[in-house]
């Protein structure tokens, strides 16, 4: 059997492809390459260039490949952008996923793993948030992901489909083997922005909001290494194939760091000072979002291997230093 990875040319998706291949899986990637890169996809995976919202294309993929599971990463992920363009986010994250789900159901694919987000909780407070917490997304991005969770719930109740939705906290770092990492120009991820600043790729950076109700006034987030995140997906796939039922689980380390603590780590690991200016809060940013990950550990047997902020930053810095020139690589043959 094979796994279809949507968005497999992107940051998390490209790590997922390597994780699956390392585990001996056959992998098909569907990506429209709007933000991802062909070179980021492991050469052993089959790439199909296209959109998950293209029903004819997706249906053909599912008919012509022995797909027994879909791992769905394709989507838009920038919170402030979603505030400015809500309809674009509802189209790309919600409507296109509805089309993908329809194709999955019609093809009889039994398993679906969804890339959800901690943004479904909104401002959850300083304590680690459990999956049973009130769902109150504060941005169209969070709403678009929550709507997909609801579609999965209802679809699984009506059809022979089992699913896992993993609610990500702040995904960071890069493949420790240096095969892939966060490569999108203009990315808004804090650790990437800080690493770019440390390496001189940016003249400086901003801290958005210093008056939050947190110990140092800056936002607190639970930063999870991307390798630990994709390992959770692989374990979720194993669980579903073994007959496990539907599951929603947080993916984080159950503790957080403030923006200023992250910047201190980047300065410490890189040995560089950062040109930082303070700016007003951004729309949609919650003061603190930290995971309670007990369910993922219990249900998936997940044990993080990279829970160390300086280690996460070190992998991100190494990738950032190696990234020069990669985005200009020639394309491989498209399928």
Image (cartoon, rainbow, N blue to C red):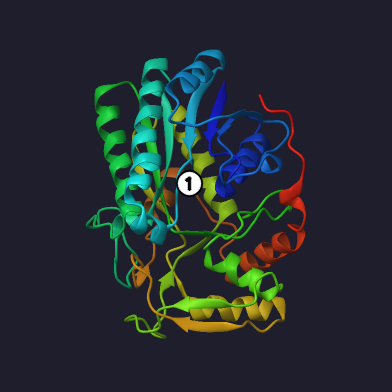
| Residue at the spot of label 1 | 301
In the rendered image of this protein, does residue 106 appear above or below residue 95? above
Residue 308 can be seen in this image: no
Q: Residue at x 33, y 21 (%)?
A: 160
Task: State left or right for residue 138 relative to residue 234.
Answer: left
In the rendered image of this protein, does residue 212 appear above or below residue 77? below
The residue nearer to you, when weighing 7 against 131, is 7
The residue nearer to you, when weighing 88 against 174, is 88
How many neighbours does mark 1 have within 10 angstroms: few (below 14), some (14-19), or many (20 or more)? Answer: few
> Where, quadrant-wise, is the N terminus in this rendering?
top right
In the rendered image of this protein, does residue 122 appear above or below residue 233? below
Give residue 186's position: percent from left, percent from top.
58, 60
Give residue 333's position: percent from left, percent from top.
73, 28
SS at mark 1?
loop
Q: Residue at x 33, y 43 (%)?
A: 90
The residue nearer to you, when weighing 255 against 313, is 313
Task: State left or right for residue 226 relative to residue 170.
Answer: right
Give residue 176's position: percent from left, percent from top.
70, 56
The residue nearer to you, when weighing 181 against 276, is 276
Task: State left or right for residue 202 relative to residue 4.
Answer: right
Q: Residue at x 55, y 17 (%)?
A: 66
Q: Residue furthest top?
A: 63
Q: Residue at x 31, y 34 (%)?
A: 152
């Amino acid at each position: 059997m094979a796994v279809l990875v949507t968005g497999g040319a992107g940051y998390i998706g490209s790590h997922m492809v390597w994780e699956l291949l390392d585990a001996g899986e056959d992998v098909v990637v569907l990506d429209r390459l709007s933000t991802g890169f062909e070179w980021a996809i492991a050469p052993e995976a089959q790439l199909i260039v296209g959109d998950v919202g293209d029903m004819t294309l997706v249906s053909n993929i599912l008919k012509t490949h022995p797909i027994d599971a879909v791992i769905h990463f394709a989507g838009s992920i920038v919170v402030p952008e979603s505030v400015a363009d809500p309809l674009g986010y509802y189209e790309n994250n919600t409507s296109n996923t509805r089309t993908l789900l329809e194709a999955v159901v019609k093809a009889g694919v039994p398993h679906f793993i969804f890339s959800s987000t901690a943004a479904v909780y909104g401002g959850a407070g300083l304590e680690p948030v459990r999956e049973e917490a009130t769902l109150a997304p504060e941005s169209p991005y969070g709403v678009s992901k929550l709507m997909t969770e609801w579609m999965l719930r209802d679809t699984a109740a009506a059809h022979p489909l089992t699913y896992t939705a993993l609610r990500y906290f702040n995904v960071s770092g890069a493949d420790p083997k240096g095969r892939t990492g966060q490569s999108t120009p203009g990315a808004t991820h804090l650790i990437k922005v800080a690493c770019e600043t440390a390496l001189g790729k940016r003249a400086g950076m901003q801290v958005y909001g210093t008056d939050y109700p947190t110990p140092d006034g800056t936002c607190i987030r639970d930063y999870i290494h991307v390798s630990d995140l994709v390992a959770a997906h692989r374990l979720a796939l194993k669980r579903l194939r073994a007959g496990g039922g539907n599951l929603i689980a947080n993916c984080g380390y159950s503790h957080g760091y403030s923006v200023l603590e992250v910047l201190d780590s980047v300065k410490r690991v890189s040995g560089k000072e950062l040109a930082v200016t303070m700016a007003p809060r951004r729309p949609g940013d919650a003061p603190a979002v930290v995971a309670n990950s007990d369910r993922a550990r219990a249900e998936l047997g997940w044990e993080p291997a990279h829970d160390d902020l300086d280690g996460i930053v070190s992998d991100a810095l190494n990738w950032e230093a190696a990234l020069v020139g990669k985005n200009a690589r020639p394309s491989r043959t498209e399928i």
